[in-house]
């Protein structure tokens, strides 16, 4: 006996689902640009694919990343995903051994207990039955947790759970029923044929005293098969589509496909790989401060999937990257937001034809570009000038009398065309100066110089540059007993991965104490240029929170490395706020100061003007 | 099509009864901080674009307030969105978003949506 | 036994109120955290609106203290204030404590710390000073020199520094700095007749009667220039002069001006001492941090705690004239309270 009608819902569901996914994945891959396709071709038959499988195993099945954030949630996901896979593998092994052949109808491994009643003489029969029961129990504990989570989501350390659509409801209901029904089906079968393991046999014997099992056994098998079929059929219309999509995403990433700022097929894969787990909600300060509950990536990505994005929501985000850092699926949430901004941008992006050649005949080694904001923090620019002079650097203060903006704010507003105009203007001036290095005091400028300008010279943020000067002993500094905490600016830290140089620098001149929010976990000051909608008062609300956190170790100084962070903090802080450049400039021993020096500087300045 | 730049042959009197409030109302609705401006001029003084060209963000806003939409032409296109003006504004006026919203309003006027 | 009133803060407000309370027969103690009385007044050399010398007012107040018996505890630090039935127990350091039937809070204001407006360059550029620093320069007598040591030919005054500024969280107007700017401009002009003086303002707020006349006089007799534009940022030239960047809003054009010295007209903030006392007594504060009366019209000196009153600049910026008036008004209120007059029971009906 190898067939029964009840297998149909499962079999049809599975075949339809596989066909659907084949088409869906095919279209996605087809739509990738040719460079990306080349990358895939190059890597698909390489070690990269094995790495992809490994990552699928650790992330999609073991859910290592969710484990890191939340153990209970991680266990829940793991028991369901990994447990289910084990059941499938176990089912196949049983089938292979029992039928002694490799190819069998696809439903047999799933409904093995229905078809096989005589395991006597089957190799490892007992062991496998026991193992399969153990796996089922493992999954059922996860399902129990999932029930529990629906009703008590606080237990999982998450304040809000995302809302459900119709497709989700079907998928969720069927998913929740699958394993309890399997338990009932296998248990009733066990009680009839005495073939169960420790779980199904005992449970079967128990329910045989309560219900007429011979009547219910086929009912449960039907129900089990239907629940599987419904789950497979509703999956493409539900959030669970993220599961297969994530597998593709992992593979694409391993094959070298990268997220771009504009919306492409890869971005679409990412978009559909979002599990709406909600892990990105809590770290979002727009949400935690109550300014905008709609901002977190989870909701935004949903609005994009549902084609309900609007410019207000797209622009009302700090672009701080805190969500991206925490996302267990590795979705590039800031690029996703940027892509929508680009889509929604107005055709009038700006016209900078007024930027005329300045005809500066400047030749220099180092270009210093302070950045627009730094002009409002003369403490920073003056410190940099002092340092350049102390270290006897041949530098040119490119935007001393103001300059065209670096272009990053345009990009953050989705105006790529306008950004290009500004970049072209600045780039020409930088290249013509003949410099080998450009140093900037602003992390926003740093990001665009290093990522978009495609400069052939070295781009450094001043923390990197100063660290080099100090380590190469080109700049004398004196340690101080000041207690300092460091705030990582978003664009410098998460945005550009510069965490170490600022810290190294600070330990040269002060006592650096840690806070609860270091490196990737640092908070956004609230001043962000990325948010074009937020009200001034709400910026201060965020800033106040952050300053309170940073002030907890009772520091003498809150140090940062961004003029915008500095200005944002000063508004609300009772602790002194300084840029690292200022702390370094202050720590240069005074005794080296010669009275003749000022004259020399004057000459230098005049040469420049 | 609107005229480019500030026109030379302006009528002598601002006839407020003829004010074109479409841009004003659109901006007010989408960026309420427009209402907070006290026209102190700090934004214009610090403006990065104003460093290079005759661009006056405060005056632009004043013209919109007075309904002189004809006269603002392509002024709003000169802003670089650098954000300096916000950092000096004593009233917390979100000038960058105002610029974006003015451009939006003008596009909508051109396509007869406003 | 005389009822006891404790006055916290010995500025003009505290001094005048103490004298008046004592004259009414109360036993009065002033708790002053500094080693001397007078508060900010001792730092002003010449006063608006009539250019009288500041210390004349101090002697006037001191004369009052001589006439009336008032206990003064200098260098006092209040650790705790307990309410016991209808009295207050004020615990000072060294475990000393005094009881009070009523408390008058007269803890005054702090000057805005101009370092917080980094773009104005105070503490960074040598020749940027505050109105307070200028008073110190006036007090030294002799020739007026910039911090760099030259005789200034051109001076710029910047209005509204630390007031009316969302960027430092002070939304209110400090009331006295416009007129201070006019007064100081006139003084400078008297001392350096060939100097050019410019006041950069958003609005000229000559808020008291006869202040407008001072403004008029500064133009008529002294030729002070007024430019309507708020400073966005300042720069320093090689020879340490200051470049002022504003928009000349009346010509609608950005304006740059190099001056030898730039004076920041710093505003008032609720003093640290005020905040401390407010916390100890659970007094209501406005969003600005100044003390909040029970009713803005009818209860101006009355706090939310029975028996606790306040007067002077701890409740908001005011000039000397209003400080006196406010101190005396508070005394009347305290007297009513301690004598339990019937009119104490009046209430507002909406
Ligand atoms: C730049 C400037 C110039 C001015 N020039 C003039 C002028 O020319 N003419 C004019 O009419 N007005 C002028 N004023 C206003 C004038 O200074 C004030 O009206 C007056 O000083 C207010 O007095 P006060 O007693 O309320 O406060 P304060 O002078 O501040 O006195 C408060 C006192 O309380 C003490 N204190 C504070 N906290 C505590 C505590 N917790 N415990 C104990 N003691 C405490 C302080 O030490 C201080 O002695 C000027 C103000 C400024 C800012
Ligand atoms: S973006 Fe990432 S963290 Fe946020 S809901 Fe989606 S998968 Fe979860
Ligand atoms: S980038 Fe920052 S503000 Fe934007 S959604 Fe993510 S966490 Fe929230
Ligand atoms: S700085 Fe602010 S208040 Fe002043 S004119 Fe500009 S927008 Fe208006
Ligand atoms: S954002 Fe625009 S208006 Fe504001 S300072 Fe920059 S260029 Fe000028
Ligand atoms: S008194 Fe004048 S200078 Fe002072 S805050 Fe008010 S308007 Fe500004």
Image (tube, coloured by chain):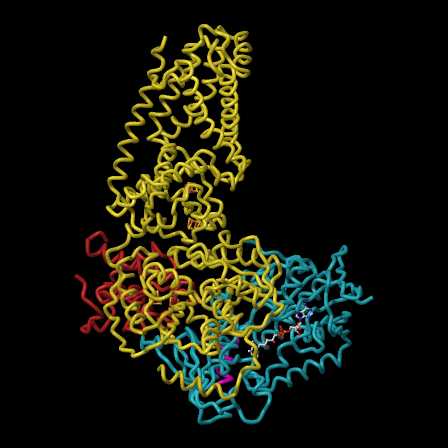
Chain colours: A yellow, B red, C cyan
Q: Main secondary structure of the magenta part?
A: helix
In the displayed structure, does residue A184 sit left or right of residue B50? right
Q: Is residue C256 left or right of residue A140?
A: left
The answer to whether residue B17 of the structure is visible from this angle is no
Q: Nearer the viewer, residue C341 or A50?
A: A50
Residue A585 in magenta? no
Taking depth in this image into account, of C254 and A564 the one nearest to the observer is A564
Q: Which residue lies at the image location 68% right of the left edge and 84% below the top edge? A: C59
Q: Which residues are magenta?
A: C175-185
Answer with the quarter of the image where residue C256 lies.
Answer: bottom left
Q: Name the image quarter holding the N terminus of chain B.
A: bottom left
Which residue is the extreme one toward the right? C1
The image shows residue A493 at horizontal and vertical percentages of: 46, 57
The answer to whether residue A450 is left or right of residue C327 is: left
As drawn, C281 above or below A231: below
Answer yes or no: is residue B70 visible.
yes
* Residue C183 image position (x, y, % from top left): 51, 84
């Amino acid at each position: 006996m190898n067939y029964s009608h009840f297998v149909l819902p499962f079999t049809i569901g599975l075949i339809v689902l596989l066909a659907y996914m084949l088409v869906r994945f095919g279209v996605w891959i087809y739509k990738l640009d040719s460079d990306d396709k080349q990358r895939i071709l190059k890597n698909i038959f390489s070690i990269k694919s094995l790495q992809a499988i490994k990552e699928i195993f650790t992330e999609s099945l073991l859910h290592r990343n969710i484990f890191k954030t939340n153990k209970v949630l991680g266990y829940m996901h793991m028991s369901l995903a990994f447990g289910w896979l084990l059941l499938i593998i176990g089912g196949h092994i049983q089938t292979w051994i029992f039928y002694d052949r490799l190819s069998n109808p696809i439903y047999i491994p799933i409904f093995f207990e229905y078809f096989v009643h005589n395991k006597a003489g089957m190799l490892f029969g007992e062991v496998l039955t026991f193992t399969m029961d153990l796996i089922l129990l493992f999954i059922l504990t996860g399902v129990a947790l999932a029930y529990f989570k629906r009703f008590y989501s606080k237990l999982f350390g998450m304040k809000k759970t995302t809302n459900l659509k119709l497709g989700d409801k079907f998928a969720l209901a069927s998913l929740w029923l699958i394993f309890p029904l399997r338990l009932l089906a296998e248990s009733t079968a066990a009680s009839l044929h005495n073939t169960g393991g420790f779980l199904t046999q005992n449970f079967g014997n128990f329910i045989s005293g309560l219900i007429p099992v011979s009547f219910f056994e086929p009912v449960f098998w039907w129900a089990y098969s239907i629940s599987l079929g419904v789950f497979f059929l509703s999956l493409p219309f539900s959030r669970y589509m993220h599961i297969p999509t994530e597998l593709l995403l992992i593979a694409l990433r391993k094959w070298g496909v990268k997220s771009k700022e504009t919306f492409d097929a890869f971005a679409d894969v990412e978009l559909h790989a979002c599990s709406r787990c909600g892990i990105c909600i809590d770290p979002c300060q727009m949400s935690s401060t109550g300014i905008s509950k709609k901002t977190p990536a989870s909701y935004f990505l949903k609005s994009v999937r549902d084609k309900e994005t609007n410019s207000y929501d797209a622009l009302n985000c700090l672009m701080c990257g805190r969500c991206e850092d925490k996302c267990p699926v590795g979705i590039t949430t800031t690029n996703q937001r940027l892509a929508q901004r680009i889509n929604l941008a107005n055709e009038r992006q700006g016209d900078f034809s007024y930027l005329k050649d300045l005809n500066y005949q400047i030749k220099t080694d180092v270009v210093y570009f302070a950045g627009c904001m730094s002009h409002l923090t003369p403490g920073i620019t003056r410190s940099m000038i002092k340092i350049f002079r102390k270290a006897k650097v041949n530098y040119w203060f490119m935007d001393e009398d103001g300059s065209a903006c670096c272009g990053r704010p345009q990009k953050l507003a989705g105006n790529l065309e306008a950004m290009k105009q500004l970049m072209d203007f600045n780039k020409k001036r930088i290249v013509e100066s003949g410099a080998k290095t450009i140093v900037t005091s602003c992390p926003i400028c740093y990001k665009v110089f290093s990522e978009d300008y495609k400069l052939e010279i070295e781009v450094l943020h001043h923390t990197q540059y100063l660290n080099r000067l100090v380590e190469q002993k080109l700049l004398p500094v004196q340690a101080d007993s000041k207690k300092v905490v460091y705030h990582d600016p978003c664009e410098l830290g998460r945005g550009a991965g510069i965490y170490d140089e600022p810290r190294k620098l600070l330990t040269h001149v002060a006592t650096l104490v840690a806070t609860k929010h270091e490196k990737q976990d640092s908070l956004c000051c609230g001043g962000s240029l990325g948010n074009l909608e937020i009200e001034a008062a709400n910026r201060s609300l965020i800033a106040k929170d952050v300053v309170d956190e940073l002030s907890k170790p009772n520091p003498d100084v809150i140090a940062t490395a961004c003029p915008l962070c500095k200005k944002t903090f000063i508004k609300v802080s009772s602790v002194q706020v300084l840029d690292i450049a200022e702390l370094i400039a202050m720590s240069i021993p005074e005794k080296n100061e010669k009275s003749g020096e000022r004259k020399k500087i004057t000459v230098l300045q005049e040469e420049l003007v | 099509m609107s005229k480019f730049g500030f026109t030379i042959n302006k009528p002598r009197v601002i006839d407020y009864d003829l004010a074109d409030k479409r841009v004003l109302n659109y901006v007010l609705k989408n960026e309420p901080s427009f209402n907070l401006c006290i026209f102190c001029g700090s934004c214009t003084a610090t403006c990065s674009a104003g460093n290079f060209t005759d661009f006056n963000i405060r005056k632009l806003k004043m013209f919109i307030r007075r309904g002189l939409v004809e006269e603002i032409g392509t002024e709003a296109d000169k802003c670089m969105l650098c954000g300096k003006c916000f950092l000096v504004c004593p009233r917390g006026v979100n000038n960058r978003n105002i610029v974006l919203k003015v451009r939006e309003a003008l596009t909508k006027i051109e396509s007869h949506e406003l | 036994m005389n009822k006891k009133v404790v006055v916290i803060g010995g500025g003009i407000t505290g001094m005048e109120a103490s004298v008046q309370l004592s004259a009414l027969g109360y036993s009065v103690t002033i708790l002053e955290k500094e080693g001397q009385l007078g508060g900010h007044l001792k730092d002003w050399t010449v006063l608006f609106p009539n250019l009288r010398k500041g210390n004349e007012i101090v002697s006037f107040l001191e004369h009052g203290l001589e006439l009336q018996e008032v206990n003064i505890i200098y260098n006092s630090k209040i650790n705790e204030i307990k309410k016991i039935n209808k009295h207050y127990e004020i615990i000072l350091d060294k475990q000393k404590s005094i009881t009070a039937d009523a408390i008058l809070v007269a803890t005054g204001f702090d000057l805005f710390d101009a370092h917080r407006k980094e773009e104005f360059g105070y503490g960074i550029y040598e020749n940027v000073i505050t109105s307070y620093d200028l008073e110190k320069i006036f007090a030294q007598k002799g020739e007026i020199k910039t911090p760099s040591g030259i005789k200034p030919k051109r001076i710029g005054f910047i209005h509204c520094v630390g007031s009316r500024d969302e960027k430092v969280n002070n939304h209110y107007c400090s009331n006295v700095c416009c007129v201070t700017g006019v007064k100081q401009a006139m003084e400078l002009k008297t001392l350096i007749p060939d100097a050019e003086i410019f006041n950069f303002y958003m609005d000229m707020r000559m808020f008291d009667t006869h202040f407008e006349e001072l403004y008029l006089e500064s133009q008529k007799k002294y030729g002070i220039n007024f430019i309507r534009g708020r400073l966005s940022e300042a720069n320093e030239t090689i020879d340490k002069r200051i470049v002022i960047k504003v928009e000349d809003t009346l010509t609608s054009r950005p304006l740059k001006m190099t001056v030898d010295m730039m004076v920041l007209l710093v505003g008032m903030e609720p003093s640290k001492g005020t905040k401390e006392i407010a916390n100890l007594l659970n007094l209501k504060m406005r969003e600005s941090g100044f003390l909040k009366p029970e009713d803005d019209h009818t209860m101006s000196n009355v706090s939310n705690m029975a028996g606790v009153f306040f007067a002077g600049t701890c409740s908001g910026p005011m000039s000397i004239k209003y400080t006196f008036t406010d101190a005396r008004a508070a005394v009347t209120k305290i007297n009513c309270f301690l004598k339990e007059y019937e009119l104490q029971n009046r209430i507002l009906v909406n």
